[in-house]
Amino acid sequence: MSEAAALSSGKGHHDENFPVASFLIAPQHRAPVLAFYRFVRTADDVADNPHAPPDEKLRLLEDMRLSLMGAGDASPEGVALRRILEERKLTTDHAADLLEAFRRDVTKLRYADWGELMDYCRYSAMPVGRYVLDVHGESRETWPLNDALCAALQVINHLQDCGKDYRALDRVYLPLDTMGKHGTDPSALAVDAATPALKAVIAELAAQNAELLKTSAAFAGRIKDLRLGLEVAIIQRFAEDLNTKLLTRDPLCQPVHHRKSSPEVDAVRRKAEGSSFYSAMRLMPKSGREAMYAIYAFCRIVDDIADDGEGTRVERLAALDEWRDDLRSLYVGGRGGRAAFLRGVVETYKPRLEDFLA
């Protein structure tokens, strides 16, 4: 175990508030996304460790940077990411930018205004989406929309965890000028419930954040990769819901997260249960939600066929061919075989057969 990994929080990609390398990400892209996530998660845990002294944190982050750049090998996570980046001919810039954010987490505990906070988000959040877009070969013209969504997600996280960040790390991301405007200061974060003044600060920042989400609303539609576009659309809706909650809830004493999925679901919904998307899909209008459950179930089933470690290659290809036949049957008015549960989706929303076959 590396020195940096020894400071691990134990948190994995399934524990994040928003999906990471979810099932909707195409298989060929999951390895570089997960390698990036492991690198970032390790660096984040270093910066957030409440016991390690600042000098040690900065040294470990520098070891990670040198390993990423090929000037050292002290960080296995840095070496692993560097190799994948070299394979895929991807830049190290996004990972290096995130390391700068983590350095700031160690050395900068207060933010004067919204502009300073957005500059922090430029390093702490925007590179994540930019990296995923690069992995998928998307146009960099989408970056401004990505940046708005990633910054909004970061602000939501800061508001959700404002009390915990202050009590555990003496770290305050709420801009000091906004706190001063409402007659309060960081000490208000030390108690178990927000004062009216602190609630006003959180509501104002959530309202400002809503403007970022308005900007990012067009993002999913600008993404060429169908699966990535769907993931971004769900994250957008997820973020909008959480941000709306923050307009009225007190994150010091009220949960501002989505509840876990209910076990009382039918067979199609059970295919989606346990995924990072189950809660997000529940936010959709009922008709769209039911359609998404069905589509997700289809995706999960055929992905499991492809990944089946017991079936032979010939058996797996035959099973996928049977699904193709059932889908074609459904689209010409037949019974649809095992694809019959998609009938309502096909009749109501008219998705293209070509997309299911793809």
Image (tube, rainbow, N blue to C red):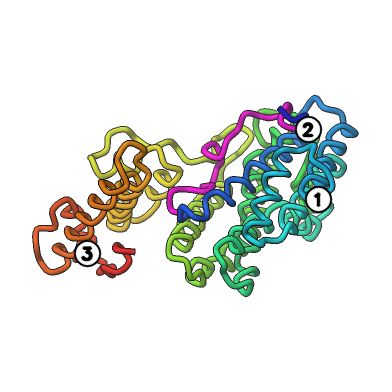
Is residue 113 something that shows in the picture?
yes
Give the secondary structure at mark 3: helix
Q: Residue furthest bottom?
A: 141
Residue linked to disc 3 = 346
Considering only order in the chain, which callout, 1 or 3, is on the residue closer to the N terminus? 1
Considering only order in the chain, which callout, 1 or 2, is on the residue closer to the N terminus? 1
Expressed as whole percent of the image width and height from the top left, the position of residue 105 reads: 80, 43
Expressed as whole percent of the image width and height from the top left, the position of residue 108 reads: 85, 44
Instruction: Tell me if residue 356 is in the magenta stretch.
Output: no
Q: Quadrant of residue 87?
A: bottom right
Is residue 167 something that shows in the picture?
no
Considering only order in the chain, which callout, 3 or 2, is on the residue closer to the N terminus? 2
Q: Which mark is residue 169?
A: 2
Which residue sits at x=64%, y=68%? Answer: 143
Q: Nearer the viewer, residue 267 or 337?
A: 337
User: In this picture, which residue range is highlighted in magenta?
Assistant: 4-24
Q: Circle 2: is it few (<14), some (14-19), or many (20+) Cα within 10 Å?
A: some
Instruction: Tell me if residue 5 is in the magenta stretch.
Output: yes
Left or right: 162 in relation to 311: right
Which residue sits at x=48%, y=41%? Answer: 258
**Vertical relation: 91 (above or below) 283:** below
**Vertical relation: 202 (above or below) 343:** above
